């Protein structure tokens, strides 16, 4: 049996390595057909390892095998150039500014002032003309900027070295996520082999390692913070959660769900540490009005750009019919209000369910509502949902992680973003089916628990 499992692991590793090598070094996002074929192979491989439609507790690989194969998969992409996202050019730009003592929030790239003509020529030739955000202030929070600056300094103004060093850093955090997931799964009496949902998921490997996105860094800080909360080490938990917020702002959405799971004194310590440390992390960049610079770019991002949206597109079409033009700004404000109200309602409705393992379900549903109303849903956003759902019986985030790659069809023509609304309709129709399936299963499980409870208290 052990020999068979080792042989399976070797075959899985070989097929995965070959597919990822082809993905990382021979495909770009305009090669939609090749991208979908490779992604289908990686997805098929994952589904063989983890037949999620049967049980959430029956992966075919042991934890050590999952860990080793997951690490190998990531190192296959070590020397590749990100091929599905060009955001890394902004990472290099901001990193060069930070490493030379400049504030990346102070100027838009188009207005950036340089200390010498040599610095200007060097950075502009290597990076500026490839930026997709020349006219916007940086939207990346302080922890990102620290890592950008550190890697830029270590790479010595060499873009390829920057990519490799940053990828090594992100792989380190990814391994950290796998290990803390295993620790939390054990705490909640779940099999640690469930980390396969993160470690070998094609979306996680291609987007975080391949395309250098920082969702893995954020998740490491969030999950480690939750571990410290469970261990009643609230100061450490607050520090780590502040680091999560200062890497990506998404964890702000999840903060209210700690309210009914902690006594008021530890909760106040937790929230106070988060607030103070978050402010401290922004202090080095406070020589400019961050609300005016970084805040304006974040607002512009969510109120001006559209990609792979769902309910937002329906609202947009209604706006066109009524007003004759795109109501993106008003729709964005309406969406924010709905998200706020939904958060409050979820919080009130579930105020009596104080177990920490239930908190993950609230996280997942809150993020689903948020993304359903967003005007932009990039593939790597789904990794938050996927990772947090590992502690639940919800399957729709996993289904979405397979479907969201279809959004890259919008880049089939070089230099143009041309979305296929048929593919978007297909993506969200299947997702809706998965959500309904999960809701029906939850209702069935709830009914079963009530029946068992009634039977337990009824006289024999």
Image: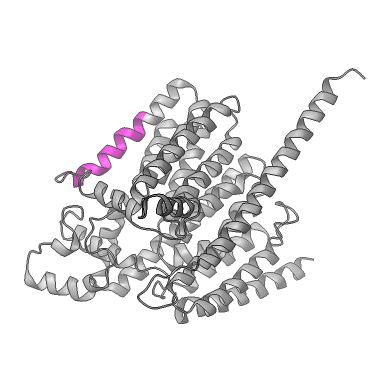
- Location of residue 276 by image quarter: top left
Instruction: State the predominant SS element of the stretch in magenta.
Output: helix
Up-down relation of residue 449 to residue 369 (above or below): above
Where is residue 185? Give x, y as percent.
Answer: 61, 45
- Location of residue 98 by image quarter: bottom left
Question: Looking at this view, is 115 or 89 the one in front?
Answer: 89
The residue depicted at 63 percent of the width and 58 percent of the height is: 430
The residue depicted at 16 percent of the width and 60 percent of the height is: 100
> Is 3 displayed left or right of 71 in the figure?
right
Where is residue 431? Give x, y as percent.
Answer: 60, 55
Up-down relation of residue 101 to residue 210 (above or below): above
The residue depicted at 40 percent of the width and 41 percent of the height is: 334
> Is 450 displayed left or right of 259 in the figure?
right
Where is residue 375? Give x, y as percent.
Answer: 42, 53
Q: Which image quarter holds the C terminus?
A: top right
Question: Looking at this view, is 105 or 176 the one in front?
Answer: 105
Instruction: State which region is magenta.
Output: 272-286
Please check the rendered image and state whether residue 284 is part of the magenta-colored stretch, yes or no.
yes
User: Residue at the top extreme?
Assistant: 459
**Is there any visible trace of residue 272 in the rendered image?**
yes
Please check the rendered image and state whether residue 228 is part of the magenta-colored stretch, yes or no.
no
> Is 113 displayed left or right of 7 in the figure?
left
Where is residue 391? Give x, y as percent.
Answer: 61, 45
How are the colours assigned in the image?
Answer: one colour
Q: Which image quarter holds the N terminus?
A: bottom right
User: Residue at the left extreme?
Assistant: 116
Up-down relation of residue 56 to residue 252 (above or below): below
The residue depicted at 73 percent of the width and 55 percent of the height is: 58
């Amino acid at each position: 049996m052990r020999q068979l499992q080792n042989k399976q692991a070797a075959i899985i590793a070989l097929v995965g390595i070959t597919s990822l090598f082809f993905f990382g070094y021979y495909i770009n996002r305009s090669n939609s057909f090749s991208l979908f074929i490779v992604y289908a192979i990686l997805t098929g491989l994952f589904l063989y390892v983890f037949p999620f439609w049967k049980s959430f507790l029956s992966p075919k690989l042991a934890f050590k095998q999952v860990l080793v194969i997951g690490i190998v998969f990531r190192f296959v992409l070590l020397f590749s150039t990100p091929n599905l996202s060009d955001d890394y050019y902004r990472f290099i730009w901001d990193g060069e500014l930070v490493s030379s003592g400049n504030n990346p929030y102070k100027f838009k790239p188009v207005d950036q002032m340089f200390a010498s003509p040599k610095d200007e020529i060097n950075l502009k030739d290597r990076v500026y003309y490839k930026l997709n955000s020349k006219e916007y202030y940086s939207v990346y929070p302080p922890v990102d900027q620290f890592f950008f600056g550190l890697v830029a300094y270590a790479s010595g103004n060499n873009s390829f070295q920057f990519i490799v060093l940053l990828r090594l850093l992100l792989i380190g955090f990814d391994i950290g996520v796998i290990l803390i997931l295993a620790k939390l799964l054990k705490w909640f009496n779940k099999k640690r082999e469930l980390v396969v949902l993160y470690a070998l998921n094609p979306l996680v490997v291609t987007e975080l390692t391949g395309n250098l996105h920082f969702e893995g860094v954020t998740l490491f800080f969030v999950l480690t913070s939750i571990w410290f909360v469970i261990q009643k080490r609230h100061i450490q938990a607050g520090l780590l959660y502040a680091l999560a917020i200062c890497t990506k702002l998404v964890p702000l959405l999840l903060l209210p769900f700690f309210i009914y799971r902690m006594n008021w004194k530890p909760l106040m310590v937790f929230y106070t540490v988060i607030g103070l440390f978050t402010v401290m992390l922004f202090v080095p960049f406070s020589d400019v009005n961050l609300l005016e610079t970084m805040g304006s770019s974040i607002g512009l991002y969510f109120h001006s750009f559209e990609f792979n949206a769902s309910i937002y597109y329906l609202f947009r079409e209604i706006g066109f019919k009524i007003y004759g033009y795109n109501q993106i700004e008003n729709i964005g404000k309406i969406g924010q209000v709905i998200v706020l109200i939904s958060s409050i309602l979820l919080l009130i409705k579930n105020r009596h369910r104080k177990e920490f393992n239930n908190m993950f379900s609230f996280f997942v549903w809150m993020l689903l509502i948020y993304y359903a109303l967003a005007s932009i849903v990039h593939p790597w956003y789904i990794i938050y949902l996927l990772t947090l759902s590992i502690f639940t019986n919800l399957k729709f985030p996993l289904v979405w992680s397979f479907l969201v790659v279809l959004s890259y069809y919008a880049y089939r023509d070089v230099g143009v973003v041309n979305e296929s609304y048929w593919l978007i309709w297909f993506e969200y129709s299947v997702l809706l089916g998965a959500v309904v399936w999960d809701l029906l299963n939850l209702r069935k499980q709830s009914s079963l628990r009530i029946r068992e409870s009634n039977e337990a208290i009824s006289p024999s």
